[in-house]
Image (cartoon, grey):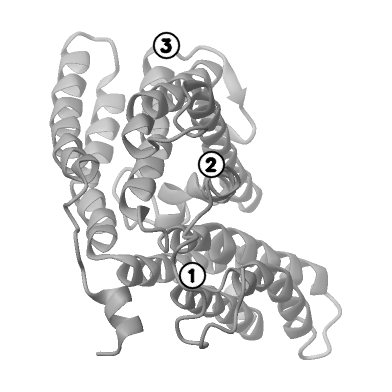
Amino acid sequence: MSEPLRQLFVPTGALDDSFVRWTAGAIGLLIVVALALNALLRRGGVISIERAADAQRRTLAWLVIAPVVAVPILLGRGWTMLAVCLLSLACWREFARATGVFRERLVSVAVVIVVLCVLFANLDHWPRLFFAAGPLGFVLVAMMALAGDRPRGYLQRTALGIFGVAFCAVGFGYLGLLANDPASRSILILMLLVTQLSDVCAYVTGSTLGRRALCPNTSPRKTLEGALGALVGSTAIMLLLGPFVFTEPPLADWRTLAAIGLLLGALSQLGDLMLSAVKRDIGIKDLGTLIPGHGGLLDRFDSLVLATPAYYHLISFFRGVATEVPVGLFSGGSASL
């Protein structure tokens, strides 16, 4: 095996980081606690039987989701990037089938090309190619949508393709870009914990205290109280866990961590609302049925689409990302930062 491939795909030091080890055990404990708490709330009449059943389905689904997400991260950079690529392709498939743009084969081909380009940019550690993939992908979609000399519907299929590039290829692609950092395991796990647990905080707060609808036409079940619960939760989680991952200033400063947690919580909810608007526009509840209680993959991970780019650029601004990792593993180092 060549040295670049060994660096990417041979897992080394998967559990060397104490934060990673403790988090793995804590996630399992959280799932057990959530199931027990749900049962207590149901018996106490705090939540309805229907709400309790929905919460139980959602929590049990995490018994599968958590290992599927964690294993590629623990295995290392290359496996994480491949998993992100598969997630991007699966989410595009859900989106394309739900919106009907899957019938536009060349538009779908363009989106897949961008996803694969993002994968190569991440594997090669070529940030400039990654950042160029989105704009060039928009142009490619617009060109592919011209096929067949059909001006009717051109704007719609082009817009759907561009949305797919931004949402599925670039938004998720930032996860792979973060994977190049030597501390990627703890950095990624921290972000996933903050964004996903903020969703849990929103759900729990909204189910128990929710009274005022946040965006009733876009997402009828979301409440203002749930949104505030998500913001408080994401900020608290970042303040609690961030110091174990970011040990040097300015990221280690509690004010910086609080701001990052608050921003991740807000962007997680906005990403979810964006997809909810898409679903309401086309008249469906979920984009898929793969995950009981959650819907499809895009329904579950839409909160990452806006939060991950912001997280990457904040870390890059304060301390840099993968600054010591060679650029251009396969392109011979010709790429530059």
Reply above or below: 141 against 289: below
Spot occupied by residue 217 in the image (x, y as percentages of width and height)? 64, 32
Spot occupied by residue 328 in the image (x, y as percentages of width and height)? 51, 80
Q: Disc 1 to disc 2, how far (Cα)?
A: 18 Å
Mark 1 and mark 3 lie on one chain; the one further toward the N terminus is 1
Q: In the image, which disc is placed on residue 272?
A: 2
Circle 3 is placed at which residue position? 209
Residue sitting at x 53%, y 41%: 272
Reply above or below: 207 against 2: above
Q: Amino acid at mark 1?
A: Arg
Q: Amino acid at mark 2?
A: Asp
Disc 2 packing (10 Å; few <14; some 14–19; many ≥20): many
Residue sitting at x 58%, y 47%: 306
Disc 1 packing (10 Å; few <14; some 14–19; many ≥20): many
The C terminus lies in quadrant: bottom right
Reply above or below: 184 against 319: below
Task: Find numbered disc 1 in the image and state the secondary structure of the residue it sits on.
Answer: helix
> Which residue is the extreme one toward the right?
151
Q: Amino acid at mark 3?
A: Leu
Circle 1 is placed at which residue position? 93
Q: Disc 1 to disc 3, how far (Cα)?
A: 36 Å
Q: Give the quarter of the image for residue 53.
A: top left
- Contact (CB < 8 A) between labels 1 and 2? no
